[in-house]
Image (cartoon, rainbow, N blue to C red):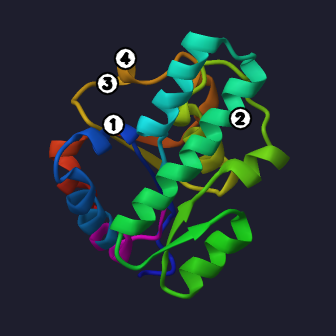
Amino acid sequence: MRATSPLRAVKVGGSLAGITGALPRAGQVLARAAAVRPTVIFPGGGPFAEAVRSFDRTHGLSDEAAHWMAILAMDQYAYVLADHVPGSRLVESLPAIRAAHEDGAIPILAPALWLRRMDDLPHSWDVTSDSLAAYVATLIGADELVLVKAVRGGMELVDPHFPRALAAGMRCSILAFEDIERLMAD
């Protein structure tokens, strides 16, 4: 890994869990890309966040409860990603991200603990893991955010709060899973 390379944050959408074989393939590509450029992997919520949405529809949750339950769902998906990305390490803080990089490991952020201390975002379903990834990418000093999604598309795939969460000047791209190899272009 080149020490002078700028930091890239890659948010891996939970929707990949619904594509047969996607997680092992994504894990291999992410590991190769992180060997070339310092990377922090940020999880979506996937089926775990969908369980929270379903529970909310059926039983009704306050925005506060739904927000924190969805963030805990992201922690669960972080464990899934850590299980599929060779050389990765689950982390919960900026010092742990730095330590993982120093050790040659790929940090995968389980964001609940960090966000409990530093969450300035609205608590509603208008703020998804995309906005949370943009927010944290700013906090860790990333110069680029890549959102990996199950399907092709543009900004219509992100939540309504995302344009406000993305730092001015931060490069952002959206990759469909079928195009994940483009992470190797850097």
Residue interval drawn in magenta:
32-41
Instruction: Kindly indicate whether the residue at mark 2 contacts the one at mark 3 (C-beta within 8 angstroms).
Output: no
Q: CA distance from mark 3 to mark 1?
A: 16 Å
Query: Percent from the top left, x then y, of residue 31?
Result: 32, 71
Q: Secondary structure at mark 3?
A: loop
Mark 2 Cα-neighbour bin, 10 Å: few <14, some 14–19, many ≥20: some
Q: Which residue is mark 1?
A: 15
Mark 1 Cα-neighbour bin, 10 Å: few <14, some 14–19, many ≥20: some
Mark 4 Cα-neighbour bin, 10 Å: few <14, some 14–19, many ≥20: few
Q: Amino acid at mark 4?
A: Glu
Q: Amino acid at mark 1?
A: Ser
Q: Secondary structure at mark 1?
A: helix
Q: CA distance from mark 3 to mark 2?
A: 27 Å
**Residue at point 78% right, 38% down?**
119
* Quadrant of the drawing holding the C terminus: bottom left
**Residue at point 55% right, 11% down?**
57
Instruction: Kindly indicate whether the residue at mark 4 contacts the one at mark 3 (C-beta within 8 angstroms).
Output: yes
**Position of 23 relative to 161 (above/below):** below
Instruction: Kindly indicate whether the residue at mark 1 contacts the one at mark 4 (C-beta within 8 angstroms).
Output: no
Q: Which residue is mark 2?
A: 68
Q: Which residue is mark 4?
A: 156
Q: Which residue is mark 3?
A: 154
Which of the two discs, 2 and 4, labels the residue nearer the N terminus? 2
